[in-house]
Amino acid sequence: MNFTHRPGAADPLRDGAETQYDLTTGRRRFAEAEFSTFNDQLKDTSFYELYQKLPFAVGRMRVRSLAPGKVMTMHADTSPRAHVALATNPFCYLTTASGQMHHVPADGNVYVFDTRLEHTAFNASEQPRLQLAIALADQETRIA
């Protein structure tokens, strides 16, 4: 589920859910700054309160899940990401290519990582991991 979307999006809850890059051509499909509108249907939630308080320009703000026993492919994003754990456990980590590991506790705090560096996430538990992932649109690397 996406909390932000591009103005005029046909399906605001799903806008930008796909990868930012066309896997065939490698070209970027959109910039994080395009996701400048908070979904009207979700403005009565604590997520909107958080959105209004964030000290950076928000790009895509969405819930990301990682099933038990799953690992994301190693990748790099175009901007840093803020993470708020919604459901997690001590066996869920973000890991950089250099081997640095970070656990994001479900404590209500916002944790910012420079995900422009290659990284992955893994869930070595038996429960789903849910994270609120928020792109820092004002720190996006400009790629043609």
Image (spheres, helix red, strand yellow):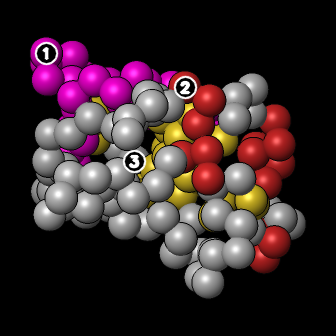
Q: Amino acid under label 1? A: Ser
| Mark found first going from the N terminus, 2 or 1 | 1
Residue 16 location in percent, x, y? Answer: 48, 64
Query: Spatial distance from mark 2 to mark 1, Cα to Cα?
Result: 22 Å
- Relative horizontal placement of residue 39, taking residue 85 as reference (left or right): right
What label sits on residue 119 in the rendered view?
A: none
Location of mark 2 (residue): 139
Instruction: Measure how far apart labels 2 and 3 are at the Cα level.
Output: 27 Å
Disc 3 residue type (three-letter): Thr
Q: Which residues are magenta?
A: 95-123
Specify the label residue 98 is tagged with.
Answer: 1
User: Where is mark 3, residue-wise?
Assistant: 88
Indicate which disc, 2 or 3, sits on the residue closer to the N terminus: 3
Q: Magenta stretch containing residue 122, yes or no?
A: yes
| Observer able to see residue 4 | yes
Task: Kindly state the secondary structure of the residue where label 1 is placed.
Answer: loop
Outermost residue toward the bottom in this view: 10
The answer to which of marks 3 and 1 sits earlier in the sequence is 3
Kind of element beneath mark 3 = loop
Number of on-image labels: 3
